[in-house]
Image: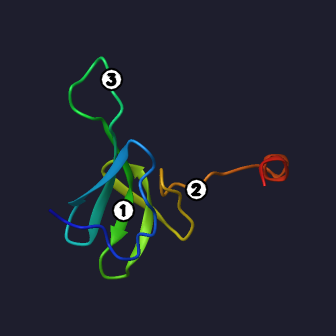
Amino acid sequence: MIELPPEFQHEPPSNYSYQVTQHNKKYLAIWIINHQEFTYTDTPPRSIWGFFHLSKRVFHAPINANTPGKEVTQTTPYSAMTINRNPLQQLLYA
């Protein structure tokens, strides 16, 4: 089992955990797994959290579960994707 990189600073939220898989030679894929009870599956659903570039030691937001996107510096425990807000939303949610 592959461990989270030391640069990963988040603790999993309540009822969640992280799983790391080798995506390709350059990237690790970091998955967030939801351990809530669901009626439609016995297997906990997982979503892509983001990607970690092994040689550059930086995180990338996902475009989808198979494609790394832009490099990011600010992440949350739930995702490496950044929230794009317009100026009014930035003012209201800051």
Judged from the image, the secondary structure of the residue bearing numbered disc 1 is strand
Give the residue drawn at x 41%, y 69%: 8
The residue wearing badge 2 is 82
Q: Find residue 75 and report its horizontal and vertical position in percent.
A: 53, 62
Question: Label 1 is placed on what type of residue?
Answer: Phe
Give the residue drawn at x 30%, y 51%: 66
Give the residue drawn at x 33%, y 23%: 38
Mark 3 to mark 2 CA distance (whole Å): 27 Å
Counting residues from the N terminus, which is met first, the one under dot 3 or under dot 1? 3
Mark 3 to mark 1 CA distance (whole Å): 26 Å
Q: Find residue 79 and report its horizontal and vertical position in percent.
A: 47, 53
Mark 2 to mark 1 CA distance (whole Å): 13 Å
Give the residue drawn at x 28%, y 18%: 40
Mark 3, Cα crowd under 10 Å, few <14 / some 14-19 / many 20+, is few
Find residue 44 and report its image quarter. Answer: top left
Question: Label 2 is placed on what type of residue?
Answer: Thr
Find residue 14 and report its image quarter. Answer: top left
Judged from the image, the secondary structure of the residue bearing numbered disc 2 is loop
Question: Label 3 is placed on what type of residue?
Answer: Phe
Judged from the image, the secondary structure of the residue bearing numbered disc 3 is loop
The answer to whether 43 appears left or right of 33 in the picture is left
Q: Find residue 16 and report its horizontal and vertical position in percent.
A: 37, 45
The residue wearing badge 3 is 38
Closer to the observer: label 3 or label 1? 3
Instruction: From this view, report whether residue 22 is shown above or below residue 12.
Output: below
Counting residues from the N terminus, which is met first, the one under dot 3 or under dot 2? 3
